[in-house]
Image: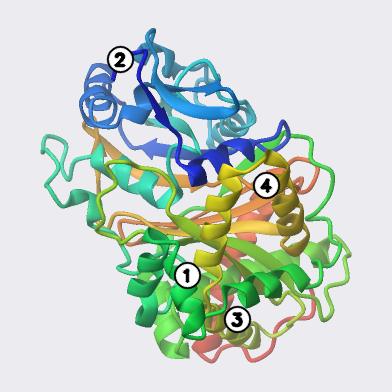
Amino acid sequence: MTASQRELMDSVDHAWLRMEGPNNLMMIGVVLIFDDKLDMVQLRSVLQTRLIDKYDRFEQVVVNDQGKDYWQLDPSFSLENHLVTVDFPAGGNKKDLQKSASQINSMALATDRPLWCIHHIESYKNGSALIFRIHHCIADGMALVRLIISLTDESPGEMPTDDNSSDLCMDKPTGGAGSNHHESLRDLIGHPSHIIDALKHGVSGAEELAAVTVRPSDPKTSLKGTLTGNKKVAWSDPFPLHDVKFIGKKLGATVNDVLMAAATGALRTHLMRAAEDVTGKTLHAAVPFNLRAVDADIEKLGNQFGLVIVPLPIGVEEPLKRLQAVKKGMDKIKHSYQAQVFFFLLQVLGKGPSVLEQTALDILSKKASLVMTNVPGPKKQLYLAGAKLNQPLAWVPQSGDIGVGLSILTYNDTVQFGLVADSALIDDLDEVAELFVAEFRKLEILINGELHVEPKGV
């Protein structure tokens, strides 16, 4: 593609581009922590051959012409503008890395360049780290995880296999969609006009949309408020995926149900510690629901997901009852068509005036208090540019006035939990991250019969 050639931006990608505001940037943030020091010569080679040469988006800038946005080759593109080594305190610890990641994820991407950037931390503990930002209009979370996998090897000196990018921890799309109609979901998305046929067979998109629109707004808590644009990020230490599967099997729940229940319990305890009344309350999370086949080609990247509004019953005191309530809500969503209705809505909004998107964001912001993602990552130990990847973390942006995001990523048979929030909403993110693990361990104790009721104190 020459500098004069342009590609009209897809309507859904365009919708995500226009959702960005000064206090809520539409970036996906990734932190990669390595046990070894990265070889920068090798890293540049990997980025050039496996990222830039393969995916046009990483050399393209967004240009606006007469109200339309296009992808166009950046004539002055240089990898050096997108791979930057940053200052980091000698002997810096986890809190220092979280501080750096928070500062970087609070900065907007330069709009006169392709919308991505990698910050390199040369020395973190005995290894190194990368902080990767990419605009949501380029790709969704599932595509980005698979893209990052494609940069890695299964051993320090081995080239990736052809199917490396699809070797994920889970074989179902994110969100736990009901398998009975996965194919019909993808068919509707691939051919939006088929929604009319679906309506004739009793699948009412209008009813799905109305159900979200008329739902009462989320109760007022400290998780909602005026945003500053100053983001903080935190994460817990990884824990075994096997333990999550064990709990799920014992309780007849999915991995997703167990992790959502742990997140609900963490939010409950956080709010109670802040002396907030959670009695009988239910919060809602906007959860991206993958509509791309796990083994589908991601060559064109882009966004292929809908949103579902998931209830988080923070008012339920007993952990097992809370898990059952979460499972009930998730089961209901699995048999709904919320995801493709939202996707179809984004297609329409991306083609219309921006005021329509703002109206939709206002509605979504009132119905949900946070964004939560659960993305399957690679099953095996991976290496990037010869360095052993110890922990990957990723956060999706929060839309409208939503300022809190929870992220769950599986990697090498472990679970990574991360949190991002506007500084005005949550002060101690580390505490909430640790509460997530504590709630999960509480479920473990319960199923072993060592605890029958939730302690009254927090």
Which residue is under mark 4?
357
- What amino acid is at disc 4? Glu
Tell me the residue at 31%/28% (across/down): 56
As rendered, which of 201 and 209 lies closer to the eye? 201
Q: Is residue 287 above or below residue 425?
A: below
The reply to whether residue 99 is visible in this rendering is yes
Q: Where does the image place residue 45, in percent across and percent down from the top left? A: 22, 21
As rendered, which of 353 and 402 lies closer to the eye? 353
The reply to whether residue 121 is visible in this rendering is no
- Label 2 SS: loop
Q: Earlier in the sequence, mark 3 or mark 4?
A: 3
- Horizontal side of 314 relative to 8 (left or right) equals right
Q: Earlier in the sequence, mark 2 or mark 4?
A: 2
- Label 4 SS: helix
Disc number lying in front (1 or 2): 1
The alpha-carbon separation of the residues under discs 2 and 4 comes to 32 Å
Q: Which mark is residue 329?
A: 3
Q: For mark 4, does the 10 Å Cα neighbourhood hold few (<14), some (14 to 19), or many (20 or more) residues?
A: many
The alpha-carbon separation of the residues under discs 3 and 4 comes to 27 Å
Which residue is under mark 2?
2
Do callouts 4 and 1 mark residues in contact (Cβ within 8 Å)? no
Do callouts 3 and 1 mark residues in contact (Cβ within 8 Å)? no
The alpha-carbon separation of the residues under discs 2 and 3 comes to 50 Å
Q: Earlier in the sequence, mark 1 or mark 2?
A: 2
Tell me the residue at 38%/78% (across/down): 181
The alpha-carbon separation of the residues under discs 4 and 1 comes to 21 Å
Q: Is residue 142 above or below residue 279?
A: above
Q: Quadrant of the N terminus?
A: top left
The alpha-carbon separation of the residues under discs 1 and 2 comes to 38 Å
- What amino acid is at disc 2? Thr
Which residue is under mark 1?
195
Disc number lying in front (3 or 1): 1
